[in-house]
């Protein structure tokens, strides 16, 4: 089995064909664009603050199977959790695809372990997480600027 075959594992192809949390998120607090010029991957990430410190994420995009499956698995992993957990997962995922120890239980996200061996694909897998980091930073900035925003 080639390295590329190994990379395109069933779970990645499954999420590419039937992405979860796909489409615009009504009432999103942040809409963040992300691009990976080296592959041509494009992503629009929708981030919404929910009760307490919770968040919900969805996405739309076009690009390779790795980038789109990563966006689907990322949205699934962080939706329903806290902002803090999302930031921790993001840091751990970035360590994983760089071939380092993630330092956190990553569950399904571990299917991207093989990406570390293909430097050209690392940016594809990182695109949704980098975009999430930017969106979370903007959400924090929004919260600080507009404390009067109704909680829902
Ligand atoms: Zn790509």
Image (spheres, grey):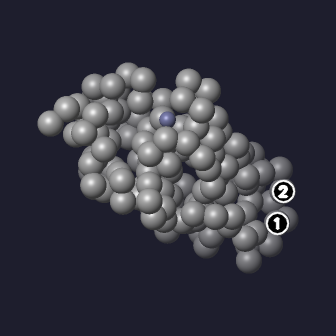
The answer to whether any part of residue 3 appears in the image is yes
Q: Position of residue 45 (x, y in %)?
A: 64, 52
Give the quarter of the image for residue 121.
top left
Give the quarter of the image for residue 66.
top left
Q: Residue furthest left?
A: 1
The answer to whether any part of residue 85 appears in the image is no
Is label 2 in a helix, a strand or a loop?
loop
Residue depicted at 28% across the width and 34% down the height: 4
Q: Is residue 75 above or below residue 2?
A: below
Is label 1 in a helix, a strand or a loop?
loop
Q: Position of residue 17 (x, y in %)?
A: 44, 59
Query: Which residue, given by chain and number where applicable, does mark 2 sit on?
Result: 146
In the rendered image, the quadrant that contains the N terminus is: top left
- Disc ID at residue 84: none
Residue depicted at 56% across the width and 24% down the height: 38
Q: Position of residue 49 (x, y in %)?
A: 65, 64
Q: Is residue 27 left or right of residue 148?
A: left
Residue depicted at 73% across the width and 71% down the height: 26
Q: Is residue 93 left or right of residue 59?
A: left
In the rendered image, the quadrant that contains the C terminus is: bottom right
Q: Are marks 1 and 2 in contact (CB under 8 Å)?
A: yes
Q: Please state which of residues 61 and 48 is positioned toward the viewer in this rendering.
A: 61
Query: Which residue, given by chain and number where applicable, does mark 1 sit on?
Result: 149
Q: Residue furthest bottom?
A: 152
């Amino acid at each position: 089995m080639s390295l590329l075959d190994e990379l395109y594992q069933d779970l990645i192809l499954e999420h590419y064909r039937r992405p979860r949390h796909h489409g615009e998120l009504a009432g999103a607090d942040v809409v963040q664009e992300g691009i990976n010029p080296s592959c041509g991957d494009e992503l629009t990430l929708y981030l919404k603050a929910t009760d307490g410190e919770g968040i919900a994420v969805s996405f739309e995009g076009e690009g390779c199977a790795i980038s789109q499956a990563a966006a689907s698995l990322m949205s699934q992993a962080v939706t329903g959790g806290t902002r803090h957990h999302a930031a921790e997962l993001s840091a751990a995922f970035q360590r994983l695809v760089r071939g380092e120890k993630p330092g956190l239980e990553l569950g399904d996200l571990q299917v991207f372990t093989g990406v570390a061996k293909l430097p050209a694909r690392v940016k594809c897998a990182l695109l949704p997480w980098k975009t999430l980091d930017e969106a979370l930073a903007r959400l924090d900035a929004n919260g600080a600027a507009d404390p009067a925003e109704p909680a829902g």
